[in-house]
Image (spheres, helix red, strand yellow):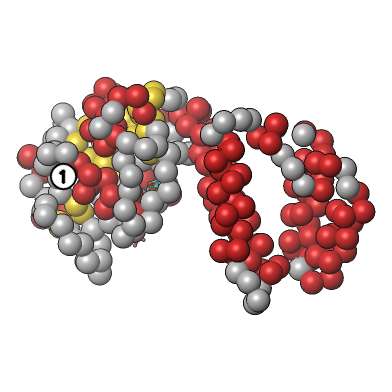
C-alpha cells in the first residue's frame, strides 16, 4: 500500500484483517500503528515478495508514484489505484495489462471506522482488482465492474451526494449560528435520507421552490443577499434547478 491517508490506512487494515499479507509505505513524518510492516522509504520494501501495489495517493500523484514504483516492482505485480476520476490508462501506459482500479464509493477520513460491505466497490482492469474488491467488501453483491468513463460519472455523483451535502450543512450552520448549529438539522436530514430508501428524489421534494411559493423564496433571497451574498447565489441556482426539474 502506498500512502497513509484515509484510504491507504483503511484498505491496508482491511486487507490485513482479511488475511492478506500487507505492507504500507508512508512518509517519514507520518505515524502508523499497525500489525503489519510499514516503511518510510521505498528502498526498504522487499520488492521480490510484492505481488501487487495499491496506489492510495492523491489523484495528481498517481502517475509519478507509478512511474517511480515501476523500476522496483517485479514484472508480474499488479498495480491498482483507488481514484474515481483517474482513468485506467494512466497505469496501463506504464504496466500494460497488469493494472486495475478498485474504487470504493465511500468517504474515508483517517482514524474513522469503515463499515466495509455496506457500500459498493467498483473495479476495472486486471481480474485481480475484482478479487481485492471482493476481499475488501467480503460480499460479491456489492462489487461491480465499471469503466473509467462510468467511474468518472460515479465520482461526480458522489461529489453531489457527499461533498456538496456536507457543504450544505455548513451553509445552514452559517445562517443559523451562533444560536444554533448544523446539528439542529440532523433529524430533518435523517428523515430525508430514510425516505430515499423507498422512493425517488423526484417524488420526495418539498419546500418553497417545489410548491411555487414565490414570495417565500424571494424573502429568503433578500435575507441572504443582505447577510450572506455567496449563499444567496447558491440558493438561487438550486431553487431554479428545483423549479425546472421537479
Ligand atoms: N478519501 C476518500 O473519501 C476517497 C474515497 C474514494 C477514493 N479515494 C481515492 O483514494 C486516493 C487516496 O485518497 P486519500 O483521501 O486517502 O488521500 P490523502 O488523505 O491525501 O492520502 C494520500 C497520502 O499519500 C501520501 N503520499 C503521496 N506520495 C507518497 C509516496 N511516494 N510515499 C508515501 N506516501 C505518499 C500523501 O502524502 P502528502 O500529503 O505528503 O503528499 C498522503 O499522506 C485518491 O486517489 C482518492 O481519489 C478517496
Q: Is residue 231 left or right of residue 56?
A: right
Quadrant (top left/top right/bottom left/bottom right) for the C terminus: top right
The answer to whether residue 218 is above or below residue 48 is below
Q: Is residue 195 left or right of residue 33?
A: right
Nearest the eye: 189 or 116: 189
The answer to whether residue 2 is above or below residue 73 is below
Residue extending furthest toward the bottom: 178
The answer to whether residue 240 is above or below residue 184 is above
Disc 1 residue: CB within 8 Å of ligand 1: no
Question: In the rendered image, which quarter is residue 200 located in?
Answer: top right
Estimate the x, y position of residue 181 in percent, counting from the top left: 60, 69
Asked if one can make out residue 65 in the rendered structure from this viewpoint, the answer is no
Identify the residue at image location x=34%, y=57%. Answer: 112
Question: In the rendered image, which quarter is residue 128 located in?
Answer: top left
Question: In the rendered image, which quarter is residue 197 located in?
Answer: top right
Q: Is residue 190 left or right of residue 101?
A: right
Total marks shown come to 1
Identify the residue at image location x=7%, y=39%. Answer: 49
Nearest the eye: 122 or 29: 122
Which residue bears the numbered disc 1?
Answer: 16
Query: Which element is circle 1 on?
Result: helix
Estimate the x, y position of residue 198 in percent, counting from the top left: 57, 31
Estimate the x, y position of residue 223 in percent, counting from the top left: 84, 66
Identify the residue at image location x=44%, y=33%. Answer: 87
The answer to whether residue 174 is above or below residue 92 is below
The local crowd at label 1, few if under 14, some if 14 to 19, many if 20 or more residues have their Cα within 10 Å, is: some
Identify the residue at image location x=61%, y=30%. Answer: 199
Estimate the x, y position of residue 1 in percent, counting from the top left: 23, 47
Q: Is residue 245 left or right of residue 141?
A: right
Asked if one can make out residue 51 in the rendered structure from this viewpoint, the answer is yes
Amino acid at each position: 500500500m502506498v500512502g497513509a491517508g484515509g484510504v491507504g490506512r483503511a484498505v491496508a487494515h482491511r486487507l490485513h484483517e482479511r488475511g492478506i499479507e500487507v505492507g504500507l509505505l508512508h512518509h517519514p513524518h507520518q505515524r502508523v500503528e499497525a500489525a503489519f510492516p510499514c516503511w518510510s522509504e521505498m528502498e526498504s520494501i522487499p520488492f521480490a515478495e510484492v505481488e501487487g501495489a495499491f496506489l492510495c495517493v492523491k489523484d495528481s500523484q498517481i502517475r509519478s508514484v507509478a512511474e517511480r514504483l515501476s523500476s522496483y516492482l517485479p514484472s508480474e505485480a499488479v498495480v491498482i489505484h483507488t481514484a474515481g476520476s483517474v482513468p485506467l490508462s494512466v497505469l496501463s501506459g506504464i504496466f500494460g495489462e497488469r493494472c486495475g482500479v478498485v474504487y470504493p464509493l465511500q468517504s474515508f477520513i483517517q482514524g474513522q471506522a469503515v463499515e466495509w460491505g455496506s457500500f459498493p466497490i467498483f473495479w476495472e482492469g486486471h481480474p485481480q482488482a475484482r478479487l481485492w474488491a471482493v476481499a475488501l467488501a467480503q460480499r460479491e453483491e456489492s462489487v461491480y465492474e465499471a469503466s473509467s468513463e462510468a467511474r468518472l460519472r460515479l465520482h461526480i455523483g458522489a461529489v453531489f451526494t457527499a461533498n456538496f451535502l456536507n457543504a450544505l450543512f455548513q451553509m445552514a450552520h452559517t445562517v443559523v449560528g451562533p444560536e444554533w448549529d448544523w446539528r439542529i438539522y440532523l433529524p430533518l436530514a435523517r428523515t430525508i435520507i430514510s425516505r430515499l430508501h423507498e422512493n425517488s428524489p423526484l417524488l420526495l421534494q418539498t419546500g418553497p421552490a417545489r410548491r411555487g411559493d414565490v414570495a417565500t423564496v424571494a424573502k429568503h433571497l433578500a435575507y441572504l443577499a443582505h447577510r450572506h451574498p455567496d449563499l444567496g447565489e447558491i440558493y438561487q441556482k438550486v431553487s431554479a434547478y428545483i423549479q425546472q426539474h421537479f
